Image: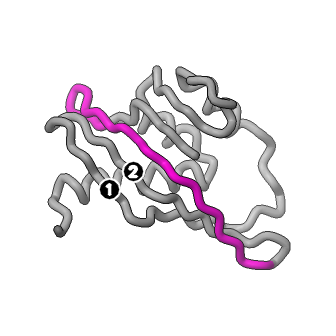
Amino acid sequence: MSPTDRDRDILSLNQAMLESVAKGDWRSYAAFCDDDLSCFEAETNGVLAEGLPFHRYYFELPADSNANPVNVSMARPHLRWLSEDAVVLSYTRLTQRLAGGEPMTTSCCETRVWQRQNGTWKQVHVHRS
């Protein structure tokens, strides 16, 4: 089944959010998120983290002066529309970078819940493993 316009909109929005993470662009990332974003990630050690301060910490770590460009993409994205204003997006996130001069690709599985709030899509929950 080919993606609809609304599917493409969410996929583009999510891709832009992933690119903000890869660039370490806190301002852009925060604009994609609800203030009380919740998440389960490896960094939470199985505990539900709530709010943007948890995420901001990682954006504020010192930058690697030898950092190389990073490419992020979504493999096999799956959208489940809960309503016109809520969608669950699941995919495998592929991250490509150079490590010691050698190309390296890592992957993780992500589920992100997007909700339209006052006409703007906001990420409200993330589950990454």
Q: Residue at x 80, y 43 (%)?
A: 62
Query: Is 51 rendered above or below residue 26?
Result: above
> At label 1, which amino acid type do we have?
His
- Comparing 61 with 74, the one in front is 74
Image mark for residue 110 = none
**Disc 2 secondary structure class:** strand
Q: How far is the residue under mark 1 from the one under mark 2?
A: 5 Å
Q: Earlier in the sequence, mark 1 or mark 2?
A: 1
> At label 2, which amino acid type do we have?
Ser
Callouts 1 and 2 close, C-beta under 8 Å = yes
Task: State which quarter of the image contains the N terminus.
Answer: bottom left
Using a 10 Å C-alpha cutoff, classify the residue at mark 2 as few (fewer than 14 neighbours), some (14 to 19) or many (20 or more): many
Q: Which residue is mark 1?
A: 78
Name the main secondary structure of what is drawn in magenta. Answer: strand
Image mark for residue 90 = 2
- Asked if residue 44 is among those painted magenta in the image, a careful observer would answer no
Left or right of 87? Residue 58 is: right
Left or right of 59? Residue 65 is: right
- Comparing 109 with 52, the one in front is 109
> Where residue 58 sits: x, y (%)?
69, 37
The colour mode here is one colour
- Asked if residue 109 is among those painted magenta in the image, a careful observer would answer yes
Q: Residue at x 49, y 26 (%)?
A: 38
Span of residues in magenta: 102-121
